[in-house]
Amino acid sequence: MGPAPVDAGFIFVRTGLDGSDREVVATADAVIATEFATVLGDREGPLVSTAEHVLAALRGMGVDNATIEVDGAEVPIMDGSAAAFVAAIDQAGIVTQPGVRRFIQVLKPVQVKIGESVGELRPFAGGFRTEVEIDFTNQVIGRQTFTFDLSPEGFRREVARARTFGCMSDVARLWGAGFALGASFDNTVVFDEARLLNAEGLRYADECARHKVLDVIGDLALAGLPLLGSYRSVRGGHKLNNAVLKALLADRSAWRVVESETARRPARGHVEAGAGTVAGLVAPAYGPDVS
């Protein structure tokens, strides 16, 4: 990960493609698949799969502009969470770029239903809030809910370490289809019908719901600017998240761009990032001054 210009957003750079680098700009319209992960690209160019975890780390830690270099078609899964990306951002430090910080403010409710899944963005005065409800037939997972108000420290503490999860029957099905070949107990929380199979146990009692929140933050980072609003997801996933974001952006009366005067001030105690490090526009405290 490295710096990007002001208002550039998040840009993936696929390296080593016929001796050249190719950019994949992380936007809602760049999503071409959502079945097992969020895949960015176009039908004829390079792809970037499993983009959501690194995007969640960047957005969660208050970074607005960054380049993410990948030398393959998939962002490394690491331990199945965003913790390693947060650690990399911490190690590199974040710089403040000139200019005011811009946000997309949700002005009215926007709802999308896909089967039994429902997602809705609504106005919210307190920054950005995510409410997730999952309801699995697997009784070990069952029904879980988690509500999270986004802030860098909250993200680090409450969300970043939540791992990808699934049922053993689903993992076997994915392997048979040629997907998730790198999935293991080291990077996936796996359940059978009776118990959790990971020897180390869960990192949070509601880790599955928290990982869904992580996915939401990463998927909605494709808005291009931080969101001011609340998002509620019931039985959701990547497909629903992307559909709701596209529905919001398509309705020009449902949002506006606002600026934060507090973003004019430099961040205190920031670390200047050099070549090959992470940099971007750091957020002031969430819940900014907006016009």
Image (cartoon, grey):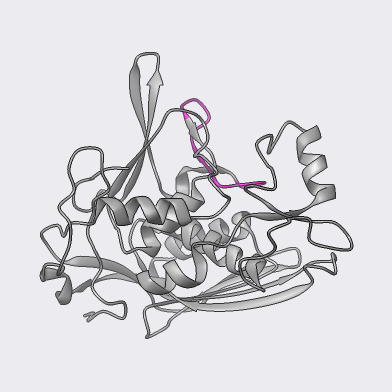
Q: Residue 204: image x %, image y %?
A: 62, 71
Q: Residue 76: image x %, image y %?
A: 51, 39
Q: Is residue 45 magenta?
A: yes
User: Quick one: which residue is furthest to the front in this view?
Assistant: 199
236 over 287 or under it: above or below:
above
User: Quick one: which residue is furthest to the top in this view?
Assistant: 18
| Left or right side of 263 for 243 | right
Q: Is residue 231 magenta?
A: no
Q: Residue 87: image x %, image y %?
A: 38, 54
Foreground: 73 or 290?
Answer: 73
| Left or right side of 82 for 101 | left
Q: Which residue: 35% across, 50% down?
A: 88
107 over 219 or under it: above or below:
below
Name the image quarter holding the N terminus.
top left
The picture quadrant where one finds residue 172 is: top right
Majority secondary structure of magenta residues: loop
The answer, for residue 222, to whether it is visible in the render is: no
Q: Which residue: 48% across, 55% down?
A: 82
User: Quick one: which residue is furthest to the right in this view?
Assistant: 194
The answer, for residue 290, to whether it is visible in the render is: yes
Numbered circles on residues, count: 0
Q: Which residues are magenta?
A: 34-46
Q: Residue 197: image x %, image y %?
A: 79, 56
Name the image quarter holding the C terminus.
bottom left
Foreground: 219 or 139?
Answer: 139
| Left or right side of 131 for 153 | left
Q: Which residue: 81% across, 33% down?
A: 176
Foreground: 47 or 281?
Answer: 281
Foreground: 18 or 117?
Answer: 18
